[in-house]
Amino acid sequence: MDFKRRLTGLQAKMEEQGLDLVVYGGSPDLQYLTGVNLEWRRGRDL
């Protein structure tokens, strides 16, 4: 998996849109983007 490419793509889109921050809760989207293995199905995000 090419997580660095995914993060670089997100950062480019953020720059285009003038965004300084995006927030992802523990979810499949966060796992796809970063490769972080989270047990996101065990609880709710706030």
Image: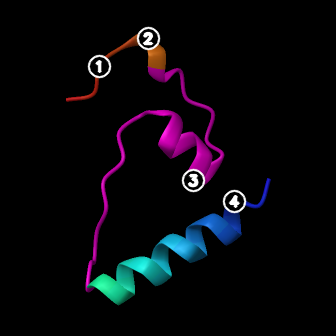
Viewer-side label of 3, 2: 3
The residue under label 3 is which amino acid type?
A: Leu
Q: Main secondary structure of the magenta part?
A: loop
21 falls in the magenta region: yes
Q: Position of residue 14 (x, y in %)?
A: 37, 78
Q: Amino acid at mark 4?
A: Phe
State the separation of the CA atoms marked 4 and 3: 6 Å
Q: Is residue 33 magenta?
A: yes
Binning the other alpha carbons within 10 Å of mark 2 as few (below 14), some (14 to 19) or many (20 upward) gives few
What scheme was used to colour the molecule? rainbow
The tag earlier along the polypeptide, 4 or 3, is: 4
Residue positioned 49% across, 71% down in the render: 10
- Whole-percent x, y for residue 5 in the image: 69, 71
Residue designated by label 3: 33
Measure the alpha-carbon separation of dots 2 and 4: 24 Å
Q: Which residue is mark 1?
A: 44
In the image, is residue 9 above or below residue 33? below
Q: Kindly identify which residue carries mark 2.
A: 42
The residue under label 4 is: 3
> Circle 1: is it few (<14), some (14-19), or many (20+) Cα within 10 Å?
few
| First of labels 3, 1 by sequence position | 3
Q: Are marks 4 and 3 in contact (CB under 8 Å)?
A: yes
Secondary structure found at label 1: loop
SS assignment at label 3: helix
| Residue at image point 46% right, 15% down | 41
The stretch in magenta equals: 18-40
